[in-house]
Each structure stands twice: as C-alpha cells, then as structure tokens.
Image (cartoon, rainbow, N blue to C red):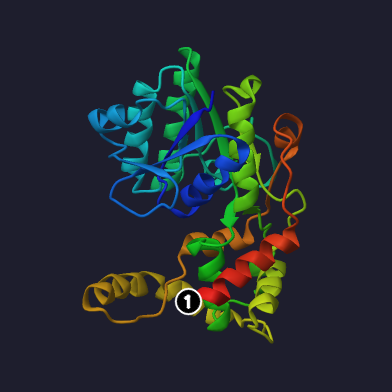
Amino acid sequence: MIRNVLVLGAGGFVGRHVLAGLPAAGFGAIAGLRSAERQAGTQVRLLDATDAASLGLALDGVTDIVNCVAAAPEAMLQATRVLCSLAGQRRIVHLSSMAVYGDKTGLVDEGVPLVAGGSYAESKVASEAILREHVAAGGQAVLLRPGCIHGPGSAQWTTRPARLLRQGRLGDLGAAGDGICNLTSVADLVEAVVAALERPEVNGAAFNISDPQPGDWNGYFLRLALAIGATPLRRLPGWQMKADKLAAFPLKAAEIVGRRLRLSVPEPIPASLWRLFRQDITLDHRRCDAALGIRRQAPEVALAEAAAWFLRKD
C-alpha cells in the first residue's frame, strides 16, 4: 500500500523540493497549498494549515505529513498546534531550524537546551515543544533542524548572497566572516525527510541536518563568487560593513515603500546576518549519520547546482 504524504507549505522553496522527491522514494505526494498552483503530476489540496476545519478535510486518505510551512511566526506556531490536534497516528516530519540554538557556540548537538531569541526562533522552539507533547501523548513526529538551506530556488542562501556579491556588498569580510557556515543542501534535506518517514524507530527524535565539514563564511562567499563569475572578490573595508549595518533599518523601511510604489531600492542586510557571519557554531551531524544514514550530495555539486540555477534565472 502506498503511503500518501501531505506536504504543508508545498508552494515554498523546501516544500517544492520535498514534493518532487517523494515519488522517487515510493510515496504518494499531495501538495497542500493555500491557493491554486500548477503542480504537474501532483495531487493538490487547497487548505489553510492554521484552520482546523480546512486541514481536517485535507487529511482524508493521508498517512503522513511533512510540515514545511514558512510564514509569519505566529502562523507557523498555530499551524503546528492545529496539525498536532488532528494528526492522530499519522507521522509528522517537522522542519525546524538551527535558529533554536540561538547564539550558542562550539559543537552543538541536539540535546542542548534550546534558546528562544527573536520571534522566528521563539516560534520554532515553541513548535518543537508542542510536537514533543504530541509524541508524549502517543503521536508520531520527527524534528529536522537544518542549517542554512541552499540550492536551486533558495532566495535566502543562494539568491541573496549571490546578488550581494555581484553588488560588491559581500566579499572577504575578514574577521567578520570567520564564523562557521552551516550550509544544508536542499537535496540532503529531502533525503532526511524521506529517511524520517521510512524509519519508525526515530519517532520523537530531533536531527541536525548540515554539511559534516563546514567551512567559514568567507570561504563560502569565495566559492559562490567563483561559480557565478562575481570575481575578483575584494576585501570589504570596515567602514563599508559599518555603513551597511547602520543602513539596515532605513533600507528595510524604504524596501516596504518601494514595493508598494514599484521602485527598486538596495536590499538591506539585517543585523542578524552580520551576527551569523561571526558565530562560531558547528552543527553536530553524528546523530543524523547514525540514525538516518542519508546519502549526502557532494558540497561542490550542491554549490554548482545552486549557482547554475541562479545564473539561469538572473
């Protein structure tokens, strides 16, 4: 009997990749979407993941759920509440984030206390708590904590740095870019989702999903710049980085206004990014290796695919 997997947030970057990867692993794939979109060869169910009546109807005939909902923090949290109230014995594979580790440093495994710093991280931490309660009550859930998810379609970790590299607003950051770059290939994340669905013994577990041998952010920017032709890569002077930090808030405000008026404004680089570029945190991948045994995509292949997609769309 084929297991039918409902992918919540199927219209987003990760959701689209998960949806495409499930049939190859022998699962039936159902796209859970808020509005009608063309998904070639895929069954679509229109739903509001934050509404119990809507989601309840969409769960008919579904055996498993992958939660890829990417929305405002409160909406993500509400979607998790509703999902756990309706899932019954269906397995939930929930996409969390390394953001639950806050500003921790060093080698970080899945057993460390989580940190609710900022609204996004707070929603992820709170969502994990709801899912653990669901498991304790007899339900099924597996939590995946990816790092910075990159690959074809990634606006945050492929398009944004590539664009900023071309503009000369990212480059060699010196000490400001010496933090550990915990990249997660979207292909690796799909592999982890499939393994979490296939292995009943991992119920209730959380897994870091990241490159086992991460480099620093300066190294990533250099490799990406070479792949997209944004070279030579220059060393950014301190005054430029300081100016970009000071400009983040007014640029964000201008971006909102510009969107309404259809005007182009420089992209803000938020303070959270500058902090991440310095953060000496390494996601411990050993539990994933031992329990999920995923076949990882070679880092150079992942980067080449991401760069090729960016160049095609640019």
Q: Going 29% across and 46% down the picture, which residue do you hit?
A: 34
Instruction: Give how far across and how far down residue 62 sits, in percent.
Output: 42, 27
Instruction: Give how far across and how far down residue 161 sits, in percent.
Output: 55, 70
Quarter in which the N terminus is drawn: top right
Name the residue nearer the viewer: 69 or 285.
69
Q: Can residue 189 be seen from the camera position used here?
A: yes
Left or right: 157, with 302 as reference point: left
Left or right: 223, with 4 as reference point: right
Instruction: Give how far across and how far down residue 212 sits, in percent.
Output: 75, 48
Mark 1 — residue? 244
Name the residue nearer the viewer: 10 or 122.
10
User: Vertically, is 232 above or below 310?
Assistant: below
Q: Secondary structure at mark 1?
A: helix
Q: Going 60% across and 26% down the picture, which residue do you hit?
A: 205
Instruction: Give how far across and how far down residue 301 sits, in percent.
Output: 72, 62
Inspect the image, locate mark 1, and give the three-letter code of the amino acid beneath it: Asp
User: Vertically, is 291 above or below 23?
Assistant: above
